[in-house]
Structures are given as C-alpha cells and as structure tokens.
C-alpha cells in the first residue's frame, strides 16, 4: 500500500500535468482563432477569384484556336506543383505530389525519359521528394 509521501507526490504530479494541459489548450485555442481570422480575411479574395474564373470559363469560345492549345510534338513539358509551406494540412501535400509524379510517369513518360520534363515547385514541402526521385525541378 502507498504511503502518504507517495500519495502527495502523485497528487502534485497530476496537478502539474493538469496545468500543462490547460496551458496547451489555451495556446491551441489562440492559434485556432488566429487561423479562423485569416480564413475570414481571405473570403473577399476567394469570391473575387471565383468570379474571375467563372467569367473566363463562360467566355472560353475559340480558345482551341489559340497558340497555347496547339499540340507541339516534341517540345518540353513543364508541370507546376503547388504545395503548402507547413506540413499540418492533412494529405494535401502527399496527394499533390502523388498526382504530379503519376502524371509524370504516365502521361509524360517519354518527356521524363528524354529529360524534357521539368517541375516548378512552389511551397516548402515539395522539393525533398523530387531530389530523392531525381526529377529535374526548380524552386
């Protein structure tokens, strides 16, 4: 059976753990509030961007005639990969990288093998994998 000193030590450690947990909860609540405020500030930009993209999509008649939509044969291929700067965004980074690599290996295999495929990487969580995969990239 535990003596009085062990019980007091246990009570003190539980109290200390409770204080640490409470402090961590307050810090995370403050970070969540800051993130929510940042999202609310982005709403006008998102609505304006959505309007612009809707307008472009509605008036895309004749785009097939433009030079950007013409097949070019054996030209270079550039894939732009956008990832986050931090890793706490679920599977977003992994899904974006997997999609880019599958696109490179499936759709543009010939360009990849002939060194005509390059990536532009935007975001901090991107280029480590491309260095490991030995895929030419910028960023």
Image (tube, helix red, strand yellow):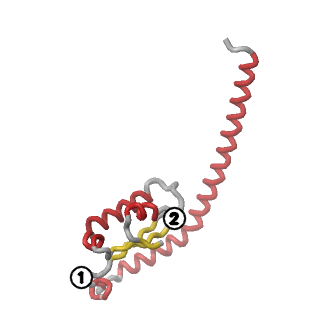
Q: Residue 92, percent across and down?
A: 44, 58
Q: Residue furthest top?
A: 1
Q: Secondary structure at mark 2?
A: loop
Residue depicted at x 29% and y 82%: 75
**Res 32 label:** none
Q: Nearer the viewer, residue 58 or 104?
A: 104
Residue drawn at x 36%, y 60% as measured from the top left: 98
Side of 129 where 41 appears, left or right: right
Residue depicted at x 59% and y 58%: 36
Tell me the quadrant of the picture where the N terminus can be found.
Answer: top right
- Horizontal side of 43 relative to 14 (left or right) equals left
Residue sitting nearer the eye, 127 or 45 = 127
- Percent coordinates x, y for residue 12 in the rendering: 74, 28
Element carrying mark 1: loop
77 over 2 or under it: above or below: below
- Up/down of 90 relative to 10, above or below: below
Q: Nearer the viewer, residue 93 or 75?
A: 75
* Residue 69, percent from left and from top: 29, 83
In three-dimensional space, the C-alpha distance between marks 2 and 1, rounded to whole angstroms, equals: 33 Å
| Residue of label 2 | 124
Relative to residue 117, is residue 124 drawn left or right? right
The one nearer the camera, 62 or 132, is 132
Per the image, the residue denoted by label 1 is 73
Label 1: how many Cα within 10 Å (few below 14, some 14–19, many 20+): few
Q: Is 134 situated left or right of 73 in this image?
A: right
Q: Quadrant of residue 5?
A: top right
Is disc 2 surrounded by few (<14), some (14 to 19) or many (20+) residues within 10 Å?
some
Q: Is residue 125 above or below residue 12?
A: below
């Amino acid at each position: 059976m535990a003596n009085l000193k062990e019980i007091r030590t246990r009570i003190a450690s539980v109290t200390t753990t409770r204080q640490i947990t409470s402090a961590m909860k307050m810090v995370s609540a403050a970070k969540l509030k800051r993130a929510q405020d940042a999202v609310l500030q982005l709403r006008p930009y998102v609505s304006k961007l959505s309007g612009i993209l809707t307008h472009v999509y509605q008036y895309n008649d004749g785009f097939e005639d433009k030079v950007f939509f013409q097949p070019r044969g054996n030209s270079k291929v550039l894939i732009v990969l956008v990832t986050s700067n931090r890793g706490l965004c679920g599977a977003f980074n992994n899904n974006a990288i997997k999609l880019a690599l599958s696109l490179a290996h499936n759709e543009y295999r010939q360009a990849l093998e002939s060194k005509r495929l390059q990536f532009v990487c935007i975001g901090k969580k991107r280029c480590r994998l491309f260095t490991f995969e030995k895929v030419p990239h910028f960023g």
